[in-house]
Amino acid sequence: MENQGGRPRTCIKLKSMMRNVVVVISVMVLWACNSEQNPKKLTRFVDPLIGTGVATTPSAIKHGIHGENNAQVVPFVTAPFGMTNWVAQTRNTEKKCLAPYYYTDSLIQGFRASHWLSGSCVQDYGTMTLMPTMGSLVTDPQKRASGFKREKEKAQVASYQVNLERYGIRALMSATTRAGIFEFTYSKEGQAHMLFDVNSDEGQGYVNVIPEAGEIEGYNPVHRIYQGHGEAAGFSGYFVVKIEKTPLGFGVYDQDGVKAGVKTDKNKNGLGAYVSFQVQPEERIKLTVGTSFVSLEEARKNLAGEIGDKGIARIILDLDDQWESLLSQVQVEGKVEADKVKFYTGLYHSYLHPRTFSDLSGTYPAFDGNAQTMTKNSGAYYSDFSMWDTYRASHPLFNLLIPSKNRAMMESLLLMAEQGGWLPIFPVWNSYTSAMIGDHASATISDALSKGTLELNPNQYKYLLKNAFESPQDFSDYKAGKGRRGLKSYLKYGYIPLEDPVNESFHKREQVSRTLEYAFDDYTLYQTALKMGDIENAKRLRKRAANYAHVFSKPDLSVRGRYRDGSFIDSLAINERQFFITEGTPRQYMWYVPHDVAGLIALMGGDNVFNETLDSFREEGHYWHGNEPGHQTPFMYNFSGQAWKTQDWVHEIVSTEYGVGPGGLSGNDDAGQMSAWLVFAQMGFYPVAPSVPQYVISGPKFDKMEIQFENGNQLQILAPGASEGKKYIQAIRWNGKPYTKTYFDHFELLEGGAIVFDMGDMPNMLWGVSKKDRPYSMSGAK
């Protein structure tokens, strides 16, 4: 029997079967080399599902409220620092604090081209979602959603697989920096549909079907939250889809229904497009998507340049190799496999952000919505900097392991300053936000400068000074998020008094926390001023770096809200949340003096009082690892002569606040900061005060580590017994010589060599006691 084209159907089926056999064989051959099959590849230790569920760690249960006890990470398939991250969608929204995927959800609505800031409580933006279905055409994401079996969901660093049980479709996806690739395998014959949602919560956007080319294109305009809430961000998320199978039908849809045969539509709620075709059992359909923040043309060019004619097996292998190259810079050996899973998953989470914002051609949307297209010819342009979080450990980790990447990131921050007129505070969706407190872009740039990653010219330096000494003359600029919040009060009083409500900010009030963080930021800029030869401003900034003392109440041994007249607030419950503290308690924030721990010790009355107070803080369970302001606190015993307590405390946190299940992160991962803390802690040292080129020692958690630096040098760290619980440092030898300091110098580490830790089951209370061996503090500097 013949079809209308004159070919026997049996011939068509045989050719289809042979094509599928070839595809299967090619996939098997390539996958034989991937992380699952190759026991030597480190990518096999990455579990993207860690942190996708509600946190089950002790401090999250005790201290977290609202969304703070959820890591807010999703199982992204993405290149490191990818423009677009691909994920199974279980929530169809771009609303604040709602991630596209939660482990506790049981239905998949599609696969999203996401720009979710991993581990955050912000918004997804400029996204699109695609979904394969069969049978009747159902466009509503919740009504068309399919169940899946958890045991058949397979999330890996370079691919994600799941069976859509409702439709009998096996889905496989992978990615490049700016594009995604999918393969859908159909278990039965019938009518199939591919749906493409624009995802705009504002009822905006555009979609266009080009059936003769097998293409769908569209865009989703981006809008701001925080400062400028609801305003257009000045750019869109653009996408171009290519399907290798010619559709038999097509149309567009919105919340009011389907328009069959219509190619184009725009600015509707629930906007999307679809194509339909007939499929045979075990037929595979390849689909690719290019993305851009500049234009449809650039999305199409990104797709051609990064995927082109490559199959999904090749893309999976390439992406796995890309991650392997990064992970293998630090190779660890130890007895406990779970520790390796935590470590390499921590590196994976650390390397998700900031986001590549520029196209293959170098084009990117100008900062602050000024509707221009700019070009960066050397290195990528990045955005989505969760600066209140990542200045602490994420960017210091980049300075240590991938300084060339971090240099491009710092250049991006400086380009933002040039294009917008002010150095941003918390730049996400390529806009000013002032979402959190502090001025930590300045601190991050200063850290890169102090470690030789970056050079500043005088014009760039002026933007750092501008944030520290000036406020916008035009109130509309200030309201839009430019400049430090509450700076005028801070400059006048040396602290932000309680009478200043700091209204033009997402986080209002929080005056004590702002004072503490500005004091640190001033210190980092003091270091930069010295490097720039700006002695006068260096003197001013060093004086301001001591402003932390102005909100410290010695009788309470705690920070406390203060009025303009110098008096402290009457009532003070130091272990309860207060309006003048950011996301925590006075007792949790009092330790935030990373640049001058010696000064804090003196303010409290000396080593003994400091140690006793820190002891009770820990023993009474007030430390909260699930939020960033206290991340330096466990390392502070190195500054007070009891380094063994830091070793014990860090070991406990690594063991109890990080796990290998979906609940294995103790709070919002915040663009990788929680994970970067773990990476440093497992390596055995931590950057307590970014812009000080030192790392405070806590002791390794592996028996052996080899760190390969970008300069070609290799550092070997040996700590026999560490992986089996020997947590106390007895002695250290560096290149065969005794080493008694409780910190490592950044530049000495980069020289490479061999560090040998003698680890034991009992503390050596004499190690690290001498004041000359303690880490840097501003008060003790000559």
Image (cartoon, rainbow, N blue to C red):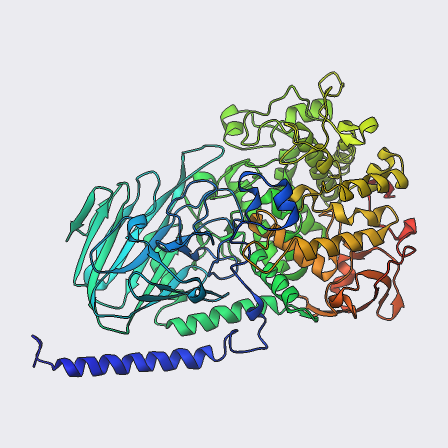
Going by the image, does 617 lie left or right of 349?
Answer: right
Vertical relation: 6 (above or below) 315: below
Residue at the image point whose x is 57% and y is 47% from the top = 668
Q: Quadrant of residue 66?
A: top right
Query: Can you see residue 458?
Result: no
Comparing 153 with 539, the one in front is 153
Q: Quadrant of the N terminus?
A: bottom left
The image shows residue 422 at horizontal and vertical percentages of: 56, 36
Going by the image, does 217 lie left or right of 39?
Answer: left
The image shows residue 442 at horizontal and vertical percentages of: 64, 42
Q: Quadrant of residue 461?
A: top right
The image shows residue 434 at horizontal and vertical percentages of: 55, 35
Going by the image, does 308 lie left or right of 357?
Answer: left
The image shows residue 266 at horizontal and vertical percentages of: 25, 44
**In the orientation shown, which residue stands out farthest toward the top?**
565
Residue at the image point whose x is 61% and y is 38% from the top = 463
Comparing 206 with 256, the one in front is 256
Q: Quadrant of residue 701?
A: bottom right
Comparing 765 with 203, the one in front is 765
Query: Can you see residue 49?
Result: yes
Q: Quadrant of the C terminus?
A: top right
